[in-house]
Image (cartoon, rainbow, N blue to C red):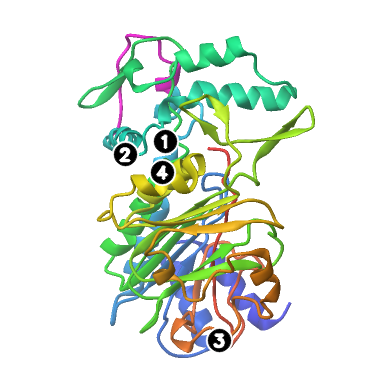
Amino acid sequence: MTNKRMLIGLAVMGVTIAGALAIRALLEAIQPGPVESFISRPQGIMGTECALTAVPAQGQNELAIIRGLSKAEQALRTVEAHMSTYLQFSELSRLNRAPAGEALKLSADTMDVLRLSRLLRAQTGGAFDVTHLPLFELWGRAGKAGRLPSEADLAAAKARCGWDKWKLLDDGAVKSIDGAGFGLGGVAKGWAVDRAAEAIVAAGCAGGLVEVGGDIRCFGRPGHKGKWIVAVQNPFNQEGNDFFGTLALNDAAVCTSGNYERFSVIDGKRYSHIVDPRTGRCVDLAPSVTVVAPTAAIADGWATALSVLGPEGFKLLDANSGIEAMIVVGGPTDYHIHETPGFAKLLDKPIPRSPAEAKAKTQPVSAGLPSHLAFPRKYAIIGAVDSHQGCPPPGHFWLHRNLIRRPAW
C-alpha cells in the first residue's frame, strides 16, 4: 500500500475531532492550502448509494462543516426510520398495520410528507397517489409468483386505495377500512434529501450537494465559481459514463425515474414496477423521466407522476412552479425526447434527440466541459471511501451521476 493510500485510509475515521485532525493531516500531506470541498459517503442509507458534499464558506471552521455533514446524515436516517415500509417498526409500517378506526400519532415530518402527497395527488390528476400501496404490493407478489393478478384481486386492492379511506389529523392519521396503506417511496427519499441539504445550509456552508440513489439537491457553487454538474444516464446503456447529457445547476433538485431498472417478467412479458393508481395496472410508457424542481420532494413526486402520464402530463405543470422535465419514450432504436420549454436552458450540452444523433456523438459527455464547470481541486473524504469513487484524477471533472435505479423503499 502506498503512503498516499495509507493517508486516504485515515479519512474513514468518521465524524469526530480525531477524524477531523486526521483529515487535515491527510490534506496537508497531499496538497497544502485550503480545503475546497468536504465529501461524506454514509453507508446503509435507504439501501442505496449516498454522497454528501459541503463547500466551506471563506474562513469557516472545519469542525462546523463536519458537524453539518453529520447532521445531514442524521436527517436522512431519521426520515427513513419514520417513513420506510421496509422497516418493521417505522411510523409508516405501524400506521399501515393499524386496524381501521385506530388513530396513530405521527411525527411532524411524516405529517408534512402526507400533506404534500395529498397535494401532489390533486396536481397530477391522480397519477401520483401514495394510497396505492395495496396495488403496489399486489403486483409485487404477482411478480414473485410469476402469475398475473386476477381481476378480482385487482378490484379488491383498488377498493382499499384512495384518500377517501384516510383522515389526516393535526398530529396523526386514521384509516376507515382495514388493509389501506401508504407507500411514500415516490416522495420520501426526495424529502429526506431536502432535509439533509438544509442541514448543510444551516452549518453555514457556501455550497453543497446531496445525492441519495439518484435524487439530488444542490445549492450554491461547487467551488469559487461554476455550477454543479448533474449527468443524466442513458437509460438504454448503463455501462460506464454513457450519459444523455449534463445539467448545470446552482440551486435546484433533480430526480430521475425509469421503467427499465425494476420489472418483472410474467408469461414472457415484461411488467414495470410503476403502477398507474387510476387503473391499478403497470405502465410501460417512459424508459426515463428526469425532473428539475425547487425541491427534491417535488421533483421526486413529479418524476413518478410523469412516468405514468408521459408527455401529456406536461399540460398539468404550472408555468410558475419552477418545474422542468424531460421524458424519453420508445426503445433503444426508436426513442424520442420530449422536454418542457425551459429544460433545454438547463443543459450544458444538447441531448441527442434520436438514436442517430446519439450514434454520431464522438466524445463522451464528460469530455470538453468548460473549465468553470470543473469540480474543486481538493477534497476531504469523510467516511468509507470506495476505491472507484475517491478523488477524481487531476484534470478530470467530477460528474454527479443521476442514477436511474430506484431502490425498493
Residue designated by label 2: 123
Query: What amino acid is labelled 3 in the image?
Result: Ile
Percent x, y for residue 248? 43, 73
Given contact means CB atoms under 8 Å apart, are the residues at marks 4 and 1 in contact? yes
Given contact means CB atoms under 8 Å apart, are the residues at marks 1 and 2 in contact? yes
Residue designated by label 4: 301
Residue designated by label 1: 128
Is residue 302 a member of the stretch shown in magenta?
A: no
Label 3: which secondary element: helix
Given contact means CB atoms under 8 Å apart, are the residues at marks 3 and 4 in contact? no
Which stretch is magenta? 94-107
Q: Is residue 75 visible?
A: no
Establish if 247 lies above or below 285.
Answer: below
Q: How far, Cα to Cα, is label 4 from label 2? A: 10 Å
Given contact means CB atoms under 8 Å apart, are the residues at marks 2 and 3 in contact? no
Residue visible at 45% across and 68% down in the picture: 18
Q: How far, Cα to Cα, is label 1 from label 2? A: 9 Å
Label 1: which secondary element: loop
- Nearest to viewer (mark 3 / mark 4): 4
Given contact means CB atoms under 8 Å apart, are the residues at marks 3 and 1 in contact? no
Query: What amino acid is labelled 4 in the image?
Result: Gly
